[in-house]
Image (cartoon, helix red, strand yellow):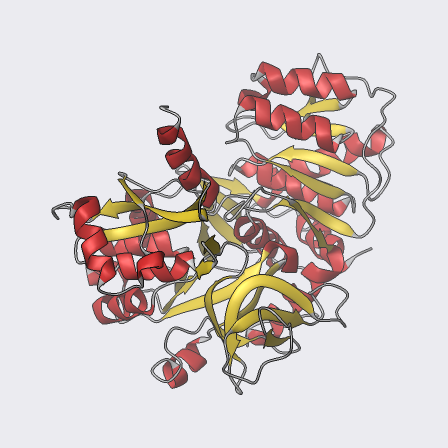
Amino acid sequence: MSYLAKQIAGVLALDSVEPAVHFKDRAVTWRDVRRTAEGLRKKLDDLGLPAAAGVGVMLRNRPQNYSAILGVIIGERCVITLNPIMPDNKVAADIRKLKPSVVVASPDDWARQDIVAATREIGAVGLVLGDNLDFEIKVHPELSKLGPGPFADLLPDIAVLMLTSGTTGEPKRAPLTYRQLELNFKRSARADPTRSEDDPPQIRPGSAILFSPFVHISGMYFALTAAVDGRAMHLMERFSVEEWRKVVAEVKPKTAGGPPTVLKMILDANIPKAELASIVNFTCGTAPISPDVVDQFVERYGTPVLSTYGATEFAGAICGWSLTTFNKYWKEKRGSAGRMHPGLEARTVDRETFEVLPAGEVGILELRGGVIGDGENWVRVSDLAKVDAEHFLWITGRADNAIIRGGFKVLPDHVVRAIEQHPAIKEASVVGLPDERLGAVPVAAYVVKPGAKDPGAEGLSTFLREQLTAYQVPVQFRRVDDLPRTPSMKVSMPAVKALFEAEASGG
């Protein structure tokens, strides 16, 4: 049995009546979680699903859906993530493409007829999760018999077939292996003086707050970590400042976290320092964060912001700040994503020749280590970065979303930083649009700070021409109330691009 399945099964076997999930003012016990997880595993066994079979799970941030994840894992099958916030036709297309032999979803998702039709079309069995305080697994009356298939091939050694966030392009599937997750969990245990990687299954005191969606690597990793550790969570279906403040006041956590967007929302809400007094550090991932925002948070709350860097393909973070390194190095390494985790290496290569660059020079990032690829060969990613001699990593942009304008390369992240230096601008995103003459041109969507006067396209162009070369200045500007985002709250560049394409077509 894999480490992951063994640890989670061991925690569930304790049959504890201690809270596992706090959700909407009620406590769900580990016994409740076990009822759904074990019930799902038994139904999958009864259907004859072998180990490594893929099981489609509609992943809402609810206790029953969390339990379903665990039920698939303890049977050493593979969770195929299905995103409930996608339109019905998109989810249905995903089911038809992936062909899981079983689809698990909440009653409100089974009320979406496109999803029922797609499940019926591929011959899969539909399993219905409980609602509210119901933790029993039921068979969908219209989807009770397994058809002839063909269904998806077995996915040996893969714990989760994860859908990436689609921040810079079309989402794709990334396999998270049982081995990757084991290595990451054991590394975390070694870094915690209160834990050991060889600890027997147990229910631990305390709880943490989770609002990242299970369909994103941050939410999935957090959920699995909580189950391995036997630690309770306060689960939110989606982030809101007011609900988060309420939970913080109740839990008084030592650590909290979220993407840069959430950090900015907390700052904008101007929460009194006393309300966050219990928080010793705030972890921040999923996207690069401005060092100015870090400094602002530290100045207001006295709380270090410990950023991380990782990717879905790596099953979590591979680099980050610890409290010790932040206190020692932040002034010297300001803006870094942190130091590479032990056993993992990073280097940069030239963007054209791919020759290895000296430490400190910006190039395309390459990584090597146990949770990356085969663990032995260098893997090239799409980020532009620099790595210093002490293994601190800076992400400086993306290599795969550069805009080539008449032979000149425009890096959107560089233009975004310039726009956000304008005193009236809260946030911006820059993407490329096709152009018959130049190949592509940059365009920008932006959000104005509350109470500030909109500088408009002319004002922004004038401002940027003082900071950028002419070819870097966007040819169009569009003010929006908020930038479109992925489930992980990153800015969705395809959706920003769609705003301008719709405008060009008269939509």
Q: Position of residue 154 (x, y in %)?
A: 84, 41
Q: Residue at x 44, y 48 (%)?
A: 438
- Residue furthest out toward the front: 437
Q: Position of residue 209 (x, y in %)?
A: 43, 52
Relative vertical location of residue 426 with respect to residue 239 in this rendering, above or below: below
* Front-most of residues 4 and 342: 342
The quarter of the image holding the C terminus is: top left
Residue 50 makes an appearance in the image: yes
Q: Residue at x 71, y 22 (%)?
A: 126
Q: Position of residue 370 (x, y in %)?
A: 72, 70
Relative vertical location of residue 114 with respect to residue 458 in this rendering, above or below: above
Q: Residue at x 51, y 67 (%)?
A: 384
Relative vertical location of residue 97 with respect to residue 166 in this rendering, above or below: above
Indicate the quadrant where residue 238 lies. Answer: top left
Give the mark count: 0
Q: Position of residue 282 (x, y in %)?
A: 38, 64
Q: Is residue 15 left or right of residue 359?
A: right
Q: Is residue 177 left or right of residue 230?
A: right
Q: Residue at x 63, y 79 (%)?
A: 356
* Front-most of residues 317 and 278: 317
The quarter of the image holding the N terminus is: bottom right
Indicate the quadrant where residue 116 lies. Answer: top right
Q: Is residue 50 left or right of residue 253?
A: right
Q: Is residue 363 left or right of residue 150?
A: left
- Residue furthest out toward the top: 142
Residue 265 makes an appearance in the image: no
